[in-house]
Amino acid sequence: MLQISQTVSIPDDEIELIAIRSQGAGGQNVNKVSSAIHLRFDINASSLSDFYKARLLALKDRRINKDGVVVIKAQQYRTQEKNRDDALERLQALIKKAGTVQKARRVTRVSTGARKRRMDTKTQRGKIKALRGKVAE
């Protein structure tokens, strides 16, 4: 069971984990051992609430394909166990990110005093620059 928050969790049977051969350098180990993990999670068929499903499908993330399936490939580590844990952590972080609601921005205005101070400094600066001109005899 993957625990997302105190109230949200995903059963293990909804997450498909497949061991595949890792890419890149690694010598003989790369050709023999399937240490990379391919994680697949179908958003529409999951037991997540409608809120999480809608938020996940609305994300512009390359790991979510057009069918609503999250595909994560973990091959950073040499062991299959560490890659499995890494893939599950990345899925957990993705769902948590989708669940967070950004606080609405309150519209604010610059105060009248701040506007007046700004204009006063501008006029003061203009007077200083005006004194730099040629001196009339």
Image: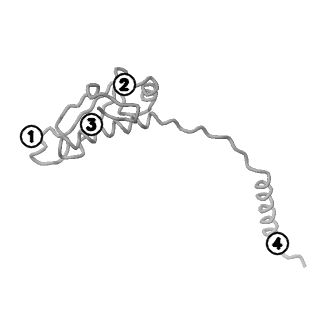
Task: Tell me the kind of residue under disc 4.
Answer: Leu
Residue wearing tag 4: 131
Q: Quadrant of residue 81?
A: top left
Q: Is residue 50 left or right of residue 104?
A: left
Image location of residue 9, percent across then percent down: 35, 31
Circle nearer the N terminus (4, 3): 3
Circle nearer the N terminus (3, 1): 1
Residue wearing tag 1: 32
For label 2, the crowd category at 10 Å Cα-Cα, with few meaning under 14, some 14 to 19 and many 20 or more, is many
Task: Tell me the kind of residue under disc 1.
Answer: Lys
Q: Residue at x 81, y 61 (%)?
A: 120
Query: Considering only vertical position in the picture, is 118 above or below 13?
Result: below
Q: Are marks 1 and 4 in contact (CB under 8 Å)?
A: no
Give the Cα separation between the discs numbered 1 and 2.
Answer: 33 Å
Q: Nearer the viewer, mark 3 or mark 2?
A: 2
Q: Quadrant of residue 91?
A: top left
Residue wearing tag 3: 73
Return the mark for residue 119.
none
Q: Give the secondary structure at mark 4.
A: loop
Q: Are marks 3 and 2 in contact (CB under 8 Å)?
A: no
Which sits in the foreground, 10 or 19?
10
Image location of residue 60, percent across then percent down: 44, 32
Q: Are marks 4 and 3 in contact (CB under 8 Å)?
A: no
For label 1, the crowd category at 10 Å Cα-Cα, with few meaning under 14, some 14 to 19 and many 20 or more, is few
Which sits in the foreground, 75 or 107?
107
Q: Residue at x 31, y 31 (%)?
A: 71
Task: Tell me the kind of residue under disc 3.
Answer: Lys
Q: Give the secondary structure at mark 3.
A: strand
Image location of residue 56, percent across then percent down: 42, 29
Q: Nearer the viewer, mark 4 or mark 3?
A: 3
Residue wearing tag 2: 43
Task: Tell me the kind of residue under disc 2.
Answer: Ile
